[in-house]
Amino acid sequence: MSDQVPATPPATPEPQTFSMDYVKELRAENKGYRLKAQELEGKLKTAEESVANAAKDTDTKVGEANKSASERILRAELKVKAKEAGLIDMDGLKLADLSKVSLKDDGSIDGADALFAGLKEAKPYLFGAANSSTPITPPPTTPPAQKLVKDMTPAEYAVAKAALLK
C-alpha cells in the first residue's frame, strides 16, 4: 500500500452577507437592465416586421414591373410579327385576342402564327399587300358637295327632282 495521507476537506468559506441597501441597489440596477432589454426586443421586433413588409412590397413591385416589361416586349414582338404577316394598321392588334400568345424565356413568341392566321380569317380587311410604292389612301370622310338649286340648270333640276321622287 502506498502511504497516502488522507486529504483534509477544504474549509468552507463563511457566507458573506450584504447590506439591504446594497441588495436593493443591485435589484434596481437589474430592473433597469431588464426594462432596457425588453424595450430593445420590442424595437427589434418592430424593425424585423418593417423589413419583412418592405421585402414583400418590393417583391410585389418587382413582380409588377416584370409583368409590365414582359407585356411591352410581347407587344413589340407582336408588331414585328404583324408587319411580317402583312397587317396594314397596327391598331388591328387591339382587335386580337392576346390570351393565347405568350413570351418564352428566350424572347420568342409562342402562338403568334396561330393568332395572325385566325385574325386573317376573321378580319381579312386588316391585311393586304402594302408596299412603299402604292400608298394606301383612306376613303373620303366628307360626302361630295351638293349643288344648290339656284345653281342648277332647269334640266339638272328636273333630273335631281326625279331622283328624289323615286
Image (cartoon, rainbow, N blue to C red):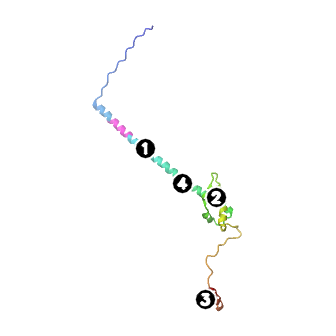
Label 4 sits on residue: 64
SS for dot 1: helix
Please name the amino acid that badge 3 sits on: Val
Q: Position of residue 66 (x, y in %)?
A: 56, 53
User: What is the CA distance from the residue labelled 2 to the residue labelled 1?
Assistant: 48 Å
**Mark 3: few/some/many CA within 10 Å (<14, 14-19, 20+):** few
Nearest the eye: 132 or 143: 143
Tell me: 143 left or right of 16: right
SS for dot 2: helix
Please name the amino acid that badge 4 sits on: Glu
Quadrant of res 19: top left
Q: Earlier in the sequence, mark 3 or mark 1?
A: 1
Q: Position of residue 1 (x, y in %)?
A: 45, 7
Give the mark count.
Answer: 4
User: What is the CA distance from the residue labelled 1 to the residue labelled 4?
Assistant: 29 Å
- Give the residue at x 31% y 34%: 25
Label 2 sits on residue: 77
What residue span does the magenta drawing correspond to? 28-37
User: What is the CA distance from the residue labelled 2 to the residue labelled 4?
Assistant: 20 Å
As drawn, 76 above or below 3: below
As drawn, 73 above or below 14: below
SS for dot 3: helix
User: What is the CA distance from the residue labelled 3 to the residue labelled 2?
Assistant: 57 Å
Label 3 sits on residue: 149
Judged from this view, the residue extending furthest toward the bottom is: 154
